[in-house]
Amino acid sequence: MVSAQQTQERIAGDGQSVVMCQNLTKVFKDFWLRQSARAVENLTFEVRPREVFGLLGPNGSGKSTTIKIMLGLLHPTSGRVAIFGKSPTDVAVKRRIGYLPEESYLYQFLNARETLDYYAKLFQLDYRTRQRRIDELIDMVGLSGAQFRQVRDYSKGMQRRIGIAQALINDPDFLILDEPTTGLDPVGTRQVKDLIIELGRRGKTILLSSHLLADVEDCVDRMIVLYGGQKREEGTCDSLLEVEDRTTIESDALDEATVAEIDAVIRRRTGGSKSIRRVARPRQKLEEFFLEIVEKARANRIATSGAQAGGPTAAFLLGNEAAQTGESLIEKLTSDAPAPSAAVVQQPAPAPKAPTGPDSDLIGTLTTDKAPGASVREPARPIEQAPMPKAPEADNDMISKLLGGTGGTGGDGASGNSGRSGA
């Protein structure tokens, strides 16, 4: 739960607004340019630096349309939107934004690691940085046991987890989460809320859009409530939710006599106009009860094929990436084996012993060209190649007969030519 002091410190900010929307209006039209829906109408608000801002409202109130205009995916009909003081269509601004859409659109034939690596390459991260962040994010969202399975085999909640990791791969300055807990079980929902609170403590600016008010109440510093595309309320959780006509007193368990005595004191001090309205024992939230059951099952090492418990927040999201890089470099340098001292003289490897025994003469004969016992071994003689066989000479007389005697030089050839002439 975010404390009131932390809320005030974040709202104070430290400079220019991260998001500024002024008189924003978006009207959708059909093919004939007739107005079909007025999604956003005259909306004005700002998101300050280091603030967790809530964009609340029921389905169809204009939350997703507003976010898409902020990202440059839709153009407003009228009004002005600025992100970090620049237009939403500025490419340099998009490098500082992490976005989780309402529906996770993922490549179904990629696994978790390949999916995160693909999005990391879009931000031109080097190989080592990509691998380090992928390892940390997969552990953080509890998908270490399913990181090599194709995304199409994931449940909706598991796809939502990898979508959250994708939105954080570039360590964004401004994080936009559109219905982040959709499809998540209570464990994943609690983890997402804890992550939002942790990133807010670090100083990141977060825009959280949801219609699940219980999820938002624990996380945001300030919020606006939309209905019909218009802003209905704006303020902090304390200013909007505090009930002024009642007082809650919490104590240890009391017996009925003590409660009756306290009620009598209240009636006497107020002239009978006020009294104890209700006495009840505090009840545990269903979310807390559910998480206790899950923790007991995990303590008993009961197997599950779904997502596991998420690990700690990724180090690079907490600003520890630079420190990790330095530590890994020092570890690499110190882990190398030290060079041998100059005072130590390395002895040459001993030469192989000559064969001894009755077979030594035979081995010497096979490995040298001299008789056994020769002191100097001569180099091996090159292998002489056998001469190629000489091709037989051609029989000219036979060739002449086959060609009609035109090429013959002997007597037989001449008589053959004369015979053909006489005929």
Image (cartoon, helix red, strand yellow):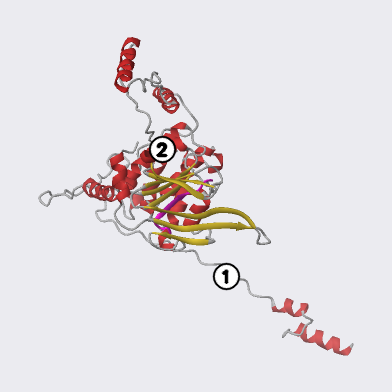
The secondary structure type at the circle numbered 1 is: loop
Marks 1 and 2, how far apart in space? 102 Å
Residue at the front extreme of this rendering: 271
The quarter holding residue 21 reads bottom left
Note whether residue 135 is visible.
no
The secondary structure type at the circle numbered 2 is: helix
Image quarter in which the N terminus is found: top left
Note whether residue 356 is visible.
yes
Looking at the image, which residue is at 50% across and 40% down? 211
Looking at the image, which residue is at 66% across and 58% down? 30
Side (left or right) of 162 relative to 365: right
Q: Which residue is mark 1?
A: 390
Image quarter in which the C terminus is found: bottom right
Q: Which residue is mark 2?
A: 217
- State which tag comes first along the sequence, 1 or 2: 2
Q: Position of residue 15 (x, y in %)?
A: 30, 57
Specify the amino acid type for callout 1.
Lys
Q: Are marks 1 and 2 in contact (CB under 8 Å)?
A: no
Above or below, comparing residue 298 to residue 28 in the picture = above
